[in-house]
């Protein structure tokens, strides 16, 4: 089997495993509140794989995470802080996370206006809202003011 055949075989035959690993990787980044080394994660996930297969699986895992789909999937379920989600997809703000959701026809789970309403109603602390969106507390307060009064 050539290396090209191995790449194709592993990416198609193991696509479910790759997606599962991508979600696990993103969740672990959320738990640790940091972007983890994806190669190290892959080595721990597939310790018995040979070097060539591990390399292919690591590349496929990185490509799946880079697509942003597993990142926003976990983020929209409140399992990943916004700053970490943004770093994982190379985004400069939370709008990019919504862009990934929209371009992949994924429901958002929540919108900034809903978060603003939850904060106004006292159901969500400002600090948690800032963490979810990946912005500072001051930016969250400004967002809430703008949502309340668009002319502010």
Image (spheres, helix red, strand yellow):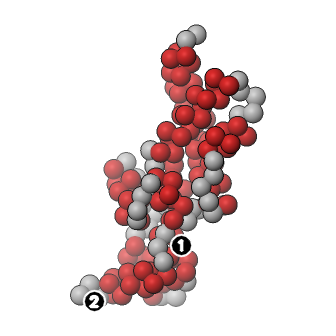
Q: Give me the residue at 54% from left, 72% from top.
A: 131
Visible in this render: residue 27?
A: no
Is 17 left, or right, of 88 in this rendering? right
Outermost residue on the top side: it is 1
**Image coordinates for residue 87, horizontal then vertical, percent:** 50, 58
- Mark 2 / mark 1, whichever is N-terminal: 1
**Image coordinates for residue 105, horizontal then vertical, percent:** 36, 50
SS at circle 1: helix
**Image coordinates for residue 71, horizontal then vertical, percent:** 51, 53
Q: Quadrant of the N terminus?
A: top right
The one nearer the camera, 83 or 31, is: 83
Q: Quadrant of residue 54?
A: top right
Q: Give me the residue at 46% from left, 49% from top.
A: 68
**Image coordinates for residue 139, horizontal then vertical, percent:** 42, 80
The one nearer the camera, 67 or 121, is: 67
Q: Quadrant of residue 43?
A: top right
Write down the residue under mark 1. Answer: 131
Quick check: 57 above or below 36?
A: above
Quick check: 69 above or below 34?
A: above
Q: Give me the residue at 68% from left, 25% from top.
A: 51
Quick check: 21 above or below 88?
A: above
Q: CA distance from mark 2 to mark 1?
A: 23 Å
Outermost residue on the right side: it is 48
Dot 2 surroundings within 10 Å: few (below 14), some, or many (20 or more)?
few
Write down the residue under mark 2. Answer: 152
Quick check: 108 above or below 130?
A: above
């Amino acid at each position: 089997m050539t290396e090209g055949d191995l790449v194709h075989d592993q990416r198609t035959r193991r696509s479910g495993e790759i997606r599962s690993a991508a979600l696990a990787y993103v969740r672990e980044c959320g738990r640790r509140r940091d972007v983890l080394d994806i190669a190290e994660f892959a080595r721990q996930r597939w310790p018995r794989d040979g070097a060539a297969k591990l390399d292919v699986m690591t590349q496929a895992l990185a490509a799946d995470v880079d697509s942003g789909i597993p990142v926003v999937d976990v983020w929209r379920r409140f399992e990943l802080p916004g700053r970490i989600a943004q770093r994982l997809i190379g985004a400069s703000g939370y709008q990019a996370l919504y862009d990934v959701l929209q371009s992949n026809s994924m429901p958002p789970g929540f919108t900034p206006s809903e978060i603003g309403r939850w904060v106004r109603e006292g159901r969500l602390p400002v600090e948690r809202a800032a963490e979810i969106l990946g912005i500072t507390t001051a930016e969250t307060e400004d967002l809430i003011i703008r949502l309340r009064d668009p002319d502010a």
